[in-house]
Image (cartoon, grey):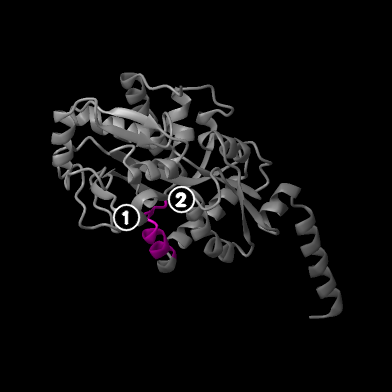
Amino acid sequence: MNKRSLLALALLAACGVGSLPAPALAQASWPSRPIRLIVPYPAGGPVDQLARAISPRLGELLGQSIVIDNKSGASGVIGMDAAIKAEPDGYTFGFGVPGGITVLPHLQKMPYAVDEINYVSLVARIPQVITVGPQVPVKTLPELVALAKAQPGRVNYGSAGNATTPHLGAELFAQEAGLKMQHVPYKGAAPAVTALLGGEIQVLAADLPAVINFTSRGIKILAVAGTRRSEALPEVPTTAELGLPTVVNESNYGLIAPKGTPPAITQKLREALVTTLNTPAVREQLARQGAVATASTPEEYRKLMQSESAKWGALVKKANISLN
């Protein structure tokens, strides 16, 4: 090929690239700088641990580092609001947390429109477990039910605060088992676990990662609130096995994007996330935390959150639950 032909090809290529609109060029080169992942809970907590478990492999696949930005407060609402309203340029994403999508909208005015959340994919599901403290003289869930029925109103259950998933999970258990227990809210899961260890409360329904490391100190995990046993605790029966099939409570966490983020970018992120969650080392790390790696399509994620919202909205109304 002579020099004139080479020059012509170069000019054609330049014209072709130059004719692409700026947004298309940006999407084609995405990502070209680090990506911020907003986690709406403090560093070191279960949700933060999920983010830090997936971010190294995800960043490796995308060719850019994932920078964790912890924006906690208001039961996850502050961080989710920041993610939803961020610049939709593909360089900010957030962790979607169930309380800010399925529970709080039934109790307060939200700073964002839940129906407009831009779902990317689920990341993990975390089963809730029903536990009792070291001082409680029961070893099984049926024994706990019998104890609570024999002492109506005298058994205390704790939570991470009013209208949190531990509160709703314990209330669901109490309703379905026909129990009358007293709710004692705390400011977070950690204080509730401390209260359970110290005997201030007798019962706690909590996400598995919050209690899994405290069994050596006497916390007894009586049941997994669901239909599937946990890989982390295969010997612990489910509520379904124990005659309470409607007592199902899992915390489902996923990635969300700012409204208006180009679909090509969210799809590329989702594809990298699916590969990340299928990486054995990542799956094992999540399993050690009590979580189950679970990818999804955006629509599957949306439908799950809509179903959960209907479920918890009905419980909030039936139990007359409030934030006060």
Residue at point 56%, 37% (across, down): 73
How many marks on residues?
2
Left or right: residue 220 compared with residue 63: left
Q: Quadrant of the N terminus?
A: bottom right
Residue at point 55%, 42% (across, down): 40
- Residue 243, position in %: x, y? 14, 39
Q: Secondary structure at mark 1?
A: helix
Q: Is residue 149 above or below residue 281?
A: above
Between 101 and 71, which is closer to the camera in this rendering? 71
Visible residue check, residue 303: no
- Residue 240, position in %: x, y? 18, 42
Visible residue check, residue 42: yes
Q: In the rendered structure, which amino acid carries the disc numbered 1?
A: Arg
What is the number of the mark on residue 162?
Answer: none
Left or right: residue 175 compared with residue 98: left
Quarter of the figure with residue 215 = bottom left
What is the number of the mark on residue 46?
Answer: 2
Tell me which segment is drawn in magenta. 282-295
- Label 1 sits on residue: 217
Left or right: residue 233 compared with residue 57: left
The question of residue 286 being in magenta is answered with yes
